[in-house]
Amino acid sequence: MMRYVKRILAVLAIMCVWGTQGLAEVTEAPNPIDISKAVKRCKACHGSDLRGKKKSPTLYGKEFSAVYTSLTSDVPKKMRGVAKRLTDEEAREVSRFISALGPDTGHPEQN
Ligand code: HEC
């Protein structure tokens, strides 16, 4: 009799472990995509603060659609290399990030 109880307990213990692992998978946030490398490339031309450098304009005050377009369908010649390397999801995520910078208020701590 005791053997059965032990077996049942063992099975229950295993089920508990599986059960909590399943829960962890469900509650975990979906893997956010990492755009830090892509943004680093933008900075190489648009300046480390993204406020523009030489012929590359500031990236402040841009609408999402303007950034997305310049990374996908209407890419400036100079940006073909960087645009080509972005998946559509990355282009969206980068555009979201850039457009969220908002207008340039001149505060260095803005980014
Ligand atoms: C190799 C240099 C280079 C890189 C890398 C680069 N850009 Fe540019 N970008 C430019 C230049 C030069 C222009 C101006 C093009 C023009 O006026 O024809 C520009 C223009 C833009 C514009 C303005 C388009 C418009 O006409 O309104 C946006 C938005 C932009 N870049 C976003 C980005 C983002 C986001 C990244 C990073 C994913 C990036 N750029 C990476 C060189 C670069």
Image (cartoon, rainbow, N blue to C red):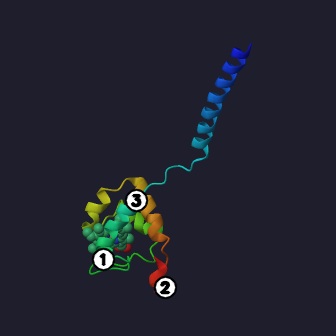
In the rendered image, which quarter is residue 85 located in?
Answer: bottom left
Dot 2 or dot 1, earlier in sequence: 1
Q: Which of 83 and 34 is in front in this view?
A: 34
Dot 3 or dot 1, earlier in sequence: 1
Residue, disc 1 = 56
Mark linked to residue 91: 3
In the rendered image, the residue lying farthest to the front is 2
Give the image location of residue 18, x and y in percent: 60, 32
Dot 3 or dot 2, earlier in sequence: 3
Q: Is mark 3 within 8 Å of ligand 1?
A: yes
Q: Distance between the residues labelled 2 and 1?
A: 19 Å
- Secondary-structure class at tag 2: loop
Q: Is mark 1 within 8 Å of ligand 1?
A: yes
In the rendered image, which quarter is residue 7 located in?
Answer: top right
Is the Cβ of the residue at disc 3 closer than 8 Å to that at disc 1? no
User: Compared to 99, does 22 lie above or below?
Assistant: above
Which amino acid type corresponds to the residue marked 2 in the rendered image? Thr
Q: Crowding near pointer 3: few (<14 within 10 Å), some, many (20+)?
A: many
Residue, disc 2 = 105
